[in-house]
């Protein structure tokens, strides 16, 4: 007689449609990034030719988005990249190592991404409350690592630090609920984000001066070594601002009709955000002297260029209002990041490739609450780091230990498993994947002091390899599953 079926454990809810998915992507992509990094991009290239960095960054984002669209539609499950990398490189062999390394780097890159939005929120709030930028302490460390060189670390404590920590805590509190309620919140945030950008674009274009916008410095497009280094630095920051179009891929088990929703949400959000970024940057460069924009980047603390713009056009009330709206968009980004990334350790734990506790789903609200709390807590620590360091470390680590593996992997998967159902297939395959590989390699290597973040990624990789092989040896996983003898009690049976 068959035993009675056991009650199923709580399941994730398929409650997100195309509109909500696109909104989540867009608020994740926009956040505080373009508002606080525009001056950094202009400074990297030394003038309004920085628009080239935004254009090339958008093309790279589209190429990478096509990678995500094909993989996401073919494997629409919670965890996104974890599932893709595991299946691409073999779930019982190399894929176990590669997918574990993805989760390992995510333990650093996801909280870095969350913290960057929170720090940006705090930095912009300093326009309203200048005393927040008062530093109470800072420290720099240098650690020599054999064969790799010196690793440099630094932290800073200021009023903005504590505000950033508070923002992460509020996002975690709001996400402690059902996914259907979160969908409604995301749509409200999307309206605020779009309204803020529309007002900035309107203000800039109605006071636009073409001579000012295109007053390139001498030799702006001379293809010297400094030009290529500046372009690489600008594209790195632009890449950070375009990232987030893949956010829905981590919510595959919570999407309606994911085979169609994922590709459409990914590509639609990239095209829409790229258009908004170009209009926003043009409007500012046409209404403000780009020398002043560079000066804001060099000051490091006074990065609220858009507040300054609105103050000059409409007065103090407009500057205060746009600052408040930008702070809301920054919070929206933190909200979306914590939501998306919290599903990845959950998926790995279900697969047995991460700590079991992360597989727990809240009995009432039905979401992976342990995973959400763990990533949020780690982000609190990174709130003590400098914004520029957080962004650079995030981009390089993510490219080397995730994006390049996926761009190569989509080709590998086509070769290894041509029969796999693919509701969406990359346009002009394999050209976008190859261009993504070239573009990512360029922005990682062609920057001033590029080795600094590459060393971070190397240390994380080496530590992850050691951790994986120790766990694999103890658990008799690949590559030790066939080499180790079975335990005595198993042999006896």
Image (spheres, grey):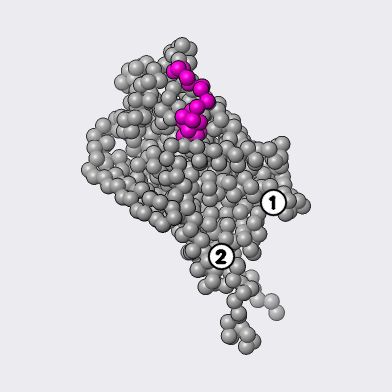
Q: Can you identify the residue that label 1 sits on? A: 413
What is the chief secondary structure element of the magenta stretch?
helix
Which one is nearer the viewer's eye here, 252 or 143? 143
Residue at 47%, 19% (x, y): give it: 219
Q: Taking the image as drawn, is residue 292 in sight?
A: yes
Q: Can you identify the residue that label 2 sits on? A: 352
Which one is nearer the viewer's eye here, 261 or 249? 249
Which one is nearer the viewer's eye here, 180 or 486? 486
At mark 2, the secondary structure is: loop
The N terminus sits in image quarter: bottom right
Mark nearer the N terminus (2 vs 1): 2
Furthest toward the right, the residue is 419
2 vs 1, front mark: 1
User: For the residues marked 2 and 1, what is the alpha-carbon distance in whole angstroms?
Assistant: 23 Å
Q: Where is residue 126 in the image (x, y as percent from the top left)?
A: 30, 33
In magenta stretch: residue 133: no
Residue at 47%, 47% (x, y): give it: 454
Q: What stretch is highlighted in magenta?
A: 216-238
Q: Where is residue 140 in the image (x, y as percent from the top left)?
A: 30, 47
- Decide: few, some or many residues near mark 2? Use Cα within 10 Å; few <14, some 14-19, many ≥20: few
Q: Residue 286 carries which label?
A: none
Q: Quadrant of residue 480?
A: bottom right
Residue at 72%, 49% (x, y): give it: 414
């Amino acid at each position: 007689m068959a035993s009675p079926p056991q009650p199923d454990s709580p399941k994730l809810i398929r409650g997100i449609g195309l509109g909500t998915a696109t909104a989540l992507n867009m608020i994740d992509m926009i956040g505080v990034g373009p508002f606080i990094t525009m001056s950094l991009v202009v400074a990297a290239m030394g003038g309004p030719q920085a628009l080239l960095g935004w254009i090339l960054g958008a093309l790279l984002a589209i190429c990478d988005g096509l990678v995500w669209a094909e993989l996401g539609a073919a494997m629409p499950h919670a965890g996104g990249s974890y599932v893709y990398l595991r299946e691409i490189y073999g779930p019982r062999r190399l894929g176990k190592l590669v997918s574990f390394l993805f989760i390992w780097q995510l333990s650093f890159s996801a909280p870095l991404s969350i913290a960057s939005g929170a720090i940006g929120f705090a930095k912009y709030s300093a326009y309203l409350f200048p005393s927040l930028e008062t530093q109470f302490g800072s420290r720099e460390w240098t650690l020599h690592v054999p064969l790799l060189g010196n690793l440099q670390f630094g932290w800073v404590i200021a009023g903005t630090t504590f505000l950033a920590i508070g923002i992460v805590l509020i996002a975690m509190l709001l996400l402690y609920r059902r996914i259907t309620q979160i969908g409604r919140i995301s749509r409200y945030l999307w309206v605020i984000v779009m309204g803020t950008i529309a007002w900035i674009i309107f203000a800039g274009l109605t006071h636009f001066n073409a001579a000012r916008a295109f007053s390139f410095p001498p030799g702006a497009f001379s293809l010297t070594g400094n030009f290529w280094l500046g372009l690489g630095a600008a594209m790195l920051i632009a890449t950070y601002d375009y990232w987030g179009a893949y956010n829905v891929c981590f919510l595959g088990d919570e999407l309606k009709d994911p085979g169609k929703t994922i590709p459409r949400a990914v590509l639609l959000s990239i095209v829409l955000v790229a258009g908004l970024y170009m209009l926003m940057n043009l409007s500012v460069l046409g209404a403000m002297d780009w020398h002043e924009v560079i000066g804001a980047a060099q000051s490091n603390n006074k990065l609220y260029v858009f507040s300054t713009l609105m103050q000059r056009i409409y007065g103090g009330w407009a500057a205060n209002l746009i600052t408040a709206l930008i702070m809301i968009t920054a919070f929206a980004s933190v909200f979306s990041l914590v939501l998306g990334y919290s599903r990845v350790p959950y998926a790995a734990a279900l697969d047995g490739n991460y700590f079991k506790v992360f597989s727990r789903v809240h009995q009432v609200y039905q979401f992976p609450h342990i995973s959400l709390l763990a990533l949020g807590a780690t982000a609190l620590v990174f709130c003590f780091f400098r914004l520029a360091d957080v962004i650079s470390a995030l981009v390089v680590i993510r490219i080397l230990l995730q994006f390049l593996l996926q761009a190569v992997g989509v080709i590998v998967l086509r070769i290894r498993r041509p029969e796999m159902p693919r509701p969406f297939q990359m346009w002009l395959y394999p050209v976008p994947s190859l261009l993504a590989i070239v573009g990512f390699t360029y922005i990682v290597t062609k920057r001033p002091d590029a080795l600094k973040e590459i060393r971070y990624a190397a240390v994380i990789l080496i530590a992850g390899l050691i951790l994986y092989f120790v766990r694999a040896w103890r658990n008799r996983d690949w590559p030790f599953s066939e080499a180790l003898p079975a335990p005595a009690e198993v042999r006896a049976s």
